Image (tube, coloured by chain):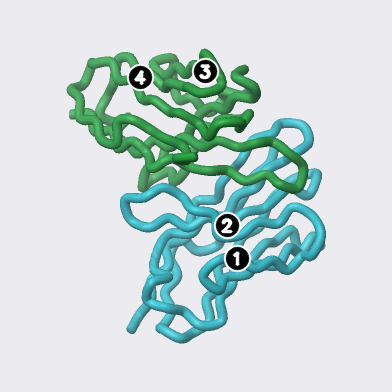
Chain colours: A cyan, B green
Amino acid sequence: AQSVTQLGSHVSVSEGALVLLRCNYSSSVPPYLFWYVQYPNQGLQLLLKYTTGATLVKGINGFEAEFKKSETSFHLTKPSAHMSDAAEYFCAAFSYQGAQKLVFGQGTRLTINP
Amino acid sequence: DAGVIQSPRHEVTEMGQEVTLRCKPISGHNSLFWYRQTMMRGLELLIYFNNNVPIDDSGMPEDRFSAKMPNASFSTLKIQPSEPRDSAVYFCASIFLQAANTEAFFGQGTRLTVV
């Protein structure tokens, strides 16, 4: 069965520091992969996605992620954290073949220290 | 398009009452998902539909939960009877299934409190 694991339920970085949020998936077929961001009391907003093609994808707000099939990973990074990046981040996988369902990781709460 | 629309945004109800949550997906989308979000369990997939047909409801916690999608523009999630442990934020998301262009759009959620 398809599953998504996010390492670290809480990550704290200083403003201006590198942000790295980890995501690994488990699937017999490489799925489509997504990162979503959720601000307090709001729904989920798409940051970026990987479906096919270039494995390094760029998203909104300066975030990017790299799909590494050999490591079954899709880690999210941002070179320099901003206070406005404080939010909860979710990694998700969608299997286009077979059971077409969108499965989420547990989420990582990102805190930015001034 | 106004996006995925959920109603109500907030619902407070007494234990034992029936609760109905509503979702209007984005026009033209052919898949719809219901999720429940809690601090303890994160985002749980409850059920999803493809072309209005329920495909997988294995995430529905109990028989008290039911979901319908009578047409492409409307879905409901019903809890009857409701219990305090059902308190959570319930999200609806819709997708247009198309290779290499798949993206889920979420509603703002319904915050349910059962007292």
Given contact means CB atoms under 8 Å apart, are the residues at marks 4 and 3 in contact? no
Pointer 1 residue: A59
Pointer 4 residue: B79
In-front residue for pair B88/B71? B71
Q: Amino acid at mark 1?
A: Gly
The local crowd at label 4, few if under 14, some if 14 to 19, many if 20 or more residues have their Cα within 10 Å, is many
Residue B69, disc: 3
Q: Amino acid at mark 3?
A: Met
Question: What is the CA distance from the residue labelled 3 to the residue labelled 2?
Answer: 27 Å
The local crowd at label 1, few if under 14, some if 14 to 19, many if 20 or more residues have their Cα within 10 Å, is some
Do marks 3 and 1 share a chain? Answer: no
Closer to the eye: label 1 or 2: 1
Does label 1 or label 2 sit earlier along the sequence? 2
Do marks 4 and 3 share a chain? Answer: yes
Q: Secondary structure at mark 2?
A: strand
Question: Compared with residue B104, is residue A64 higher up or lower down, i.e. above or below?
Answer: below
Q: Secondary structure at mark 1?
A: loop
Which residue is found at the position 78% from the left and 49% from the top? A30
Closer to the eye: label 4 or 3: 3
